[in-house]
Amino acid sequence: MKSGIVFEGGASRSLFSCGVMDALLEEKIIADYVIGTSAGIAYGTSYVSGQIGRNLELAVKYMHDKRYMGIKHLFNRKNRSYYNRDFAFGQIPKELVPYDFDAFDNFKGTAIATLTNMKSCTAEYFEIPKNNPERHIQILWAGCALPFMFSPEEIDGEIYMDGGICDPIPFQKALDDGCEKLVVVLTRERDYKKEGSEAASAAKIFYRRFPLLPKALKKRAVIYNESRRKIFELADKKELIVIAPQCTKGFRRTEKNPEILRALHNEGYNTTKQMIDNIKQYLSE
């Protein structure tokens, strides 16, 4: 029976998901199929490699570091992104908080990153390759490329950005790919509803090369809220399990405070531990 886990994005809010990952790894619960959007899959690869505590160490040591993120990196012509690519996706995984690429390569299952094709403004799903660290990192970077905060990324002649634009919680892809048991990890509380934004208007100016993007951004809240409605409907029928935080109000997408990040991680860890018997029973049925 194929099991899957879905990680919503949310930038720094994904520290909740990192706590979930650590709790599941401690219980030796490793899904056959891992899919996520944005920071969800970027952090999710440490779940795949079995590195308990790696994401928390990265967050509390370096997310407040000026080398990690900040407006100066966005205006750096060699970087053009709020996050410092060479540091966050280069020096950290290769030297400071090493990523275990060998363990990832030995993973028997599949890891998928959700990306948005900027030309068609549709979601595309990239299997994160084994034995190819540079391509691995490139796909994760493209998947995290939020509009206005990142530059688009070219892969195989196509231009991509954050998969959350078109498929913020890719649970349906997991079901379509044959997952019979599914755990969905959210980074917003159950009663959260996304409001529309004015990003679509700004996109008409900033992304003239991609005329479909403003329409996609305008529909984003509707797609997000409808995805959550379906997820909770399936959860109420006990067809999947949802793990979500109690409250994220006031928690910034670019939160840097180590104690706040640690607290959100701990909430994810403790919430999962409290649910662990139900999770095990569901997965074994």
Image: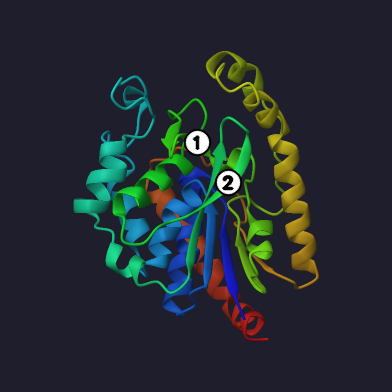
**Mark 2, secondary structure of its residue:** strand
Name the amino acid type tagged 1. Answer: Tyr
Report the front residue among 144 and 257.
Answer: 144
Question: Is residue 19 among what the camera can see?
Answer: yes
Labelled pair 2, 1 in contact (Cβ < 8 Å) = yes
Marker disc for residue 124: 2
Q: In the rendered view, tell whether residue 132 sits above or below residue 122.
A: below
* Residue under pointer 1: 160
Counting from the top left corner in percent of width and height, residue 65 is at: 27, 38
Q: Quadrant of the C terminus?
A: bottom right
Q: Residue 265: where, in percent of width, then height?
A: 45, 58
Which residue in the rendered view is the most extreme toward the top?
Answer: 205
Residue lying at 40% horizontally and 55% vertically, measured from the top left: 262
Residue at 48 percent across and 54 percent down: it is: 41
Q: How is the image coloured?
A: rainbow
User: How many labels, in total?
Assistant: 2
**Does residue 178 appear left or right of residue 76 in this picture?**
right
In which quarter of the view is residue 186 placed? bottom right
Q: In this view, does 123 lie to the left or right of 136?
A: right
x, y percent for residue 51: 34, 67
Counting residues from the N terminus, which is met first, the one under dot 2 or under dot 1? 2
Marks 2 and 1, Cα distance to the nearest angstrom? Answer: 9 Å
Q: Can residue 249 be seen in this view?
A: no
